[in-house]
Image (tube, helix red, strand yellow):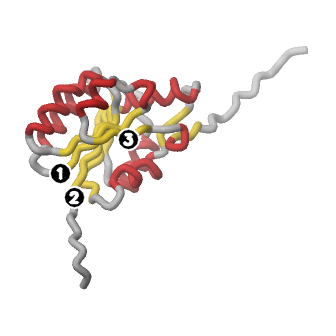
């Protein structure tokens, strides 16, 4: 046994799906772009234990494949939201504050600034993960750590091409 001390940290990842999707679409100039969660989540958690992963998404068109993949790979859940994810995500973050050491919010939306301040006051480490060009500077300044989503963290879906019959 070496003198190394291992501290186990637990992490919750809360994703504002609409915000992240819009940011990635802007960055890549494609509405078929998605975050590669299979590589991004391990990069975010590093050696820390993932306690919860929740993908909040406004609207009825939520990919069942995404939900299955997040559940299979990370025991994650997808939560549909009536309107924006801001309130449900903030409520869940507050509920998790006493259960985890770190909360990582995937969103660059300045609406989360009060949530970040509240969580930090509760002693929770708060990290933000977002596309930097679409992230409010106040959020970057207030969080404990900022993870930038880059093109390498994304992929473009290959949509089946629709063949059109052209009349000559």
Figure quadrant of residue 64: top left
Mark 3 vs mark 1: give the one in front: 3
Up the image or down, 44 lies above or below 142; here it is below
Q: Are marks 1 and 2 in contact (CB under 8 Å)?
A: yes
Q: Is residue 99 above or below residue 87?
A: below
Location of mark 3 (residue)? 147
Q: Secondary structure at mark 2?
A: loop
Residue 43, given in percent of the width and then of the height, sits at 41, 52
Q: Earlier in the sequence, mark 3 or mark 1?
A: 1
Estimate the spatial distance between the alpha carbons at disc 3 and disc 1, rounded to whole Å.
17 Å
Q: Which residue is mark 1?
A: 101
In the image, 139 versus 10, the foreground residue is: 139
Looking at the picture, tell me which residue is in the foreground, 153 or 1: 1
From the viewer's perspective, tell me whether residue 54 is left or right of residue 28. left
Q: Is residue 160 above or below residue 40?
A: above
- Corner quadrant of residue 103: top left
Instruction: Give coordinates of residue 134: x percent, y percent.
Output: 41, 24
Residue 1 % position (x, y): 24, 85
Upstream in sequence: badge 1 or badge 2? 2
Task: Count residues near mark 3 (Cα–Cα under 10 Å), then give few for <14, some for 14-19, many for 20+.
Answer: some
Alpha carbons under labels 3 and 2: distance apart? 18 Å
In the rendered image, residue 87, in percent from the top left (x then y), is placed at 20, 26
- Residue at the bottom extreme? 1
Left or right, 123 with respect to 59, comes to left
Instruction: Report the residue marked by disc 2.
Output: 9
Relative to the observer, which residue lies in front, 97 or 91? 97
Label 1 SS: loop
């Amino acid at each position: 046994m070496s003198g190394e001390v291992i501290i186990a940290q637990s992490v919750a990842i809360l994703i504002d799906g609409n915000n992240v999707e819009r940011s990635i679409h802007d960055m890549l100039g494609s509405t078929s772009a998605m975050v590669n969660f299979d590589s991004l989540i391990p990069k975010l958690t590093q050696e820390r234990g993932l306690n919860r992963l929740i993908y909040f998404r406004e609207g009825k068109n939520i990919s069942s494949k995404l939900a299955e993949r997040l559940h299979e790979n990370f025991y994650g859940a997808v939560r549909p939201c009536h309107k924006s994810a801001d309130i449900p995500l903030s409520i869940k973050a507050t509920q998790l504050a006493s259960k985890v050491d770190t909360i990582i919010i995937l969103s660059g939306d300045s609406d989360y600034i009060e949530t970040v301040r509240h969580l930090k006051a509760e002693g929770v480490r708060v990290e933000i993960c977002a596309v930097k060009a679409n992230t409010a500077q106040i959020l970057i300044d207030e969080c404990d750590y900022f993870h930038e989503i880059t093109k390498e963290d994304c992929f473009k879906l290959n949509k089946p091409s629709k063949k059109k019959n052209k009349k000559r």
